[in-house]
Amino acid sequence: MRRRKGPPHGRNQRPAQALPAPRPQTPFEREDATKRCGEVSELAFALAAARHRFGVSRPYGDSERYDLILDCHRCYPPDLGPLTTYLDPRFRPRLIRVQVKATTQMQSGVYRVNAHRRIHGRAVPYKLSEIDFFAAYVIPLDAWYLIPAALLLGTRRRTMAALSPVVTPAKKASYRYECYREAWNLLTKSRTELAHCAR
């Protein structure tokens, strides 16, 4: 017996329906997602810094402009003489204030990282007296950029850093930050040495 083509008898075929459009996030959901991404990035930086043998601390509360503090125990000077004691300021470890930033989306071949914070939707720039380093985390590549704050907040103030770890940028200026990729050795430099980055 030949099988009849077409829909089975007695069954109503439902018309094809398009998938519902994704619901746009509310401002609260966007802020919550951004905050959680920042918290995860801070944990990732703390782990990476600890693997490079830095002491890691976090300030109490959210009033400070930096996210983490690094104890650069390798910055001790060499022999300062037999009469030098550990009370000498030159023997004290250098503490580094780090602001952690993260980026996930590439636009026009670059990952953009903001060098400012937002208060009630308004961009507020950081000050050079508030932080020492920006730690920019490119999440898809698991790559860190250790950028001295003097480079972004110095005489030529910049509100954003364009990172090009994958695609060759059209502008040579976009290569400005590639030398800071995984540049953990810069964290051992003195503030005087880092000040030259702004020039």
Image (cartoon, rainbow, N blue to C red):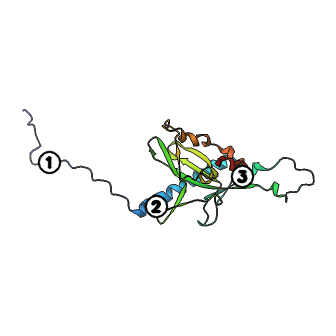
Give the Cα distance between marks 3 and 2. Answer: 35 Å
As drawn, the residue found furthest toward the top would be 2
Task: Identify the residue under disc 3.
Answer: 191
The residue at 64%/52% (across/down) is 150
SS at mark 2? helix
Towards the viewer: 155 or 106:
155
Name the residue: 84% across, 47% down.
78
Left or right: 56 in relation to 100: right
Single out the mark in the foreground, 3 or 1. 3
Residue furthest to the left: 1
Judging from the image, what secondary structure is the residue with disc 3 in? Answer: helix
> Quarter of the image containing the N terminus?
top left
Q: Are marks 1 and 2 in contact (CB under 8 Å)?
A: no
Name which residue type carries label 1: Gln
Structural crowding at the residue carrying mark 2, measured as other residues with C-alpha within 10 Å and reported as few (<14), some (14–19) or many (≥20): few
Q: Residue 125: image x %, image y %?
A: 55, 59
**Mark 1 Cα shell of 10 Å, populated few (<14), some (14-19), many (≥20):** few
Mark found first going from the N terminus, 3 or 2: 2
N-terminal label among 1 and 2: 1
Distance from label 1 to label 2 (Cα)?
42 Å
Residue 152, x across and y down, in percent: 59, 51
- Residue 42 figure quarter: bottom right
On screen, residue 168 above or below 125: above
Residue 66 lies left or right of residue 119; in this view the side is: right
Left or right? Give the position of 86 relative to 94. Answer: right
Is residue 72 found left or right of 159 in the rendered image? Answer: right
Number of the label disc, if any, that sits on residue 32 = 2
Dot placed on the residue nearer the N-terminal end, 3 or 1: 1
